[in-house]
Image (tube, helix red, strand yellow):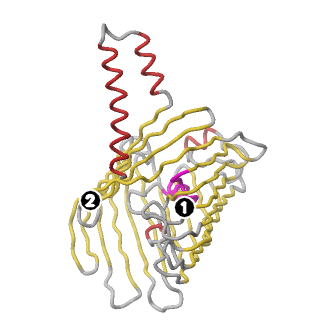
Amino acid sequence: MVKNTVILVLSLCMMLLLGASMSMADDGASQSDIDSVVKALKGVQFEGLMYLSYQDGKSNDTDYSKVALKRGYFGIKKSILPWFSARITTDIHQDDDGSTRPRIKYMYGQFHLPSSSFLTKPNIEVGQVHMPWLDFEEHINYFRLQDPMYIESNGVFNSADVGITFASLLGGTMDEDYQKTVNSHYPGRYGSVSFGIYNGGGYHAAEKNQNKVIMARFTVRPLPDVIPGLQFSYFGTTGKGNTAAEPDWNTNMGFVSYEQQYVTLTGTYYMGTGSQGGSDENDKDGYSLFAEIKPNTKFSIIGRYDKFDPNTNVDNDASNTTILGVAYMLDKPHKNMVLLDYQTKSYEDDTKSNDNRIQATLQVSF
């Protein structure tokens, strides 16, 4: 079904361009022909993102060496009305057996609402939409090409689901200099908010019960004129895991971030029960620390440390992950780049051996 959808979307685009070309070929291209093509493509944006890596390491006492197609995204956005737009994005991934498969990650209509006294650029997404957390974090820690963020890499939840999301900046936007030299994403002068209701299966699985999950993120930038890069965030979920048994799934997560031209620092504390997939309803906790040092616009040095306990009622089952890397920017910072990183994961359980990996990843973005 997903494959057919992707083929249909691409076929429609090709038919549009082919039809325009044939029309222009008849007695030469007239101004009206050109205008019709411009009108048809007005407001259309194409985008792509790829993570391509070479990995050499050991996991579960097994050595491996491989070239990996980690992820590929292709998307189309269309501005339909001044207050309404649409997006569809495919997620192309490689299964464990080596086969490459597409699926839909985002497919939604977006209503752009008028700003009010404190809500700036509010919008509502309907369909398969952004969940409130990971898109926000990934626009502070730009190194998703290395691996998923802390909370997703430990299987708590992923980034998209079928539902409705409301999002808004708070109190206007940061000045142009801050957005140009530090970060133009989520530039609310006093922070931003995002919340919604979702089926609960994520974009990897169909809904397996009738429960709906509520999620919310609240971010505050307390001192925009004194420490503009400092933000405090809270993210929470309440609902059931995505199985017929409906195990509890609750999340409480605090996040502090500091950004400026030459450094980015983040800290995460997580405490929760269960997970999106519904494999258990264990009490869990952990934390993650991340740093990016940016000596100039071409190089970054990154480091990350994660600790995760999948069951706080059991001793010696936590894991500790350390990541160190250096990135070279091929063009604009965090767009097209190459990252070389080393990752090691150790376990408190003495029966498990450490996992180690060295990886070189090319990120292609257009």
Q: Is residue 106 rendered to the left or right of residue 223?
A: left
Where residue 28 sits in the image (x, y, percent)?
Answer: 31, 9
Q: Quadrant of residue 115?
A: top right
Res. 302 mark: none
Quickly name the residue at label 1: 265
The residue closer to the viewer here, 89 or 329, is 89
Can you identify the residue that label 2 sits on?
A: 68
In terms of image quadrants, where is residue 56?
A: bottom left
Mark 1 closeness class: few <14, some 14–19, many ≥20 residues within 10 Å = many
> Where is residue 167 drawn, in percent x and y?
64, 51
Q: Which of marks 2 and 1 is in front?
A: 2
Secondary structure beneath dot 1 equals: strand
Residue pushed farthest right? 117
149 on left or right of 283: left
Please indicate whether residue 67 sits to the left or right of residue 30 in the image. Answer: left
Secondary structure type for disc 2: strand
At horizontal 53% and vertical 58% (from top left) the residue drawn is 137
Is residue 218 shown in magenta? no
Give the class, few, some or many, for how many residues have Cα within 10 Å of label 2's Cα (few <14, many ≥20): some
Task: Give the extent of the magenta segment.
Answer: 127-141
Q: Earlier in the sequence, mark 2 or mark 1?
A: 2
| Residue 191: x %, y % from top left | 67, 53
Identify which residue, 42 or 292, lies in the foreground.
42
Amino acid type of the residue tagged 2 in the rendering: Ala
- Distance from disc 2 to disc 1, alpha carbons, whole Å, reads 29 Å
- The quarter of the picture where the C terminus appears is top left
**Residue 257 location, x and y as percent?**
59, 60
Q: Which of 30 and 233 is in front in this view?
A: 30
Which kind of residue does numbered mark 1 sit on?
Leu
Q: Quadrant of residue 253?
A: bottom right
Q: Is 226 drawn above or below residue 208 in the view shown?
A: above
Q: Given the current orientation, which residue lies at the most extreme top position?
A: 27
